[in-house]
Amino acid sequence: MTTTVHGLGEIKALAGADLGRSEWLEITQERVNTFADATNDHQWIHVDPERAKEGPFGGPIAHGYLTLSLVIPLFTELLDIRGVKMSVNYGLEKVRFPSPVRVGAKIRLAAAVASVDDVPGDGVQMLLDFTVEIDGSAKPACVARVIYRHYA
């Protein structure tokens, strides 16, 4: 379920809120290959399914940065911010990849608002805790603290 907020005041009110979980997204070999082409990272554990069967993960896995990049579309399922002039991805404080995502697995995003603080220029900075979960796995694929800024 998407949370919709309007303006900086409602964004500030989200401090401490659990935004829930996105829908599941299947990681396909096609997506992994497209990411490999975009980043020029064609390591065999990602793009060679036959060789990867004999590798440490028993099959091809998604790039960690592919998993991280997918938080963008998954997060749009959780939060819709309106009534601001501009929103920017300000960066990341911490990112870890505790468990690989095998091709064919499904992932989803769990998100919580750690804090919201005023920043110069009539804006607010949100710190969000993101966890990319893998269907059927106790260990997450990715945990990250993400920083967004929104300006009125």
Image (cartoon, helix red, strand yellow):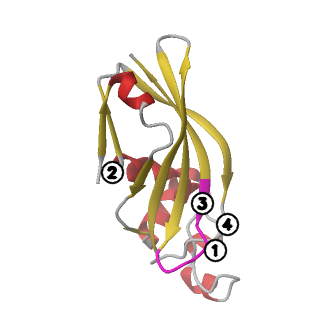
> What residue is drawn where x is 59% and y is 55%?
65
Depth check, front residue: 7 or 27: 7
- Image quarter (top left, top right, bottom left or bottom right) of the C terminus: top left
Q: Which residue is identified by label 1? A: 45
Q: Position of residue 50 (x, y in %)?
A: 57, 86
Looking at the rendered structure, which numbered label has been put on residue 98?
4
Circles 3 and 2: CB distance less than 8 Å?
no
Give me the C-alpha separation between circle 1 and circle 2.
Answer: 30 Å
Q: Is 102 included in the stretch rendered in magenta? A: no
Helix, strand, or loop for circle 1? helix
Q: Earlier in the sequence, mark 2 or mark 4?
A: 2
Depth check, front residue: 147 or 12: 12
Say left or right for 56 vs 14. right
Say left or right for 94 vs 20. right
**Residue kind at label 3, given as amino acid type:** Cys
Say left or right for 142 vs 136. right
Q: Earlier in the sequence, mark 1 or mark 3?
A: 1
Q: Earlier in the sequence, mark 3 or mark 2?
A: 2
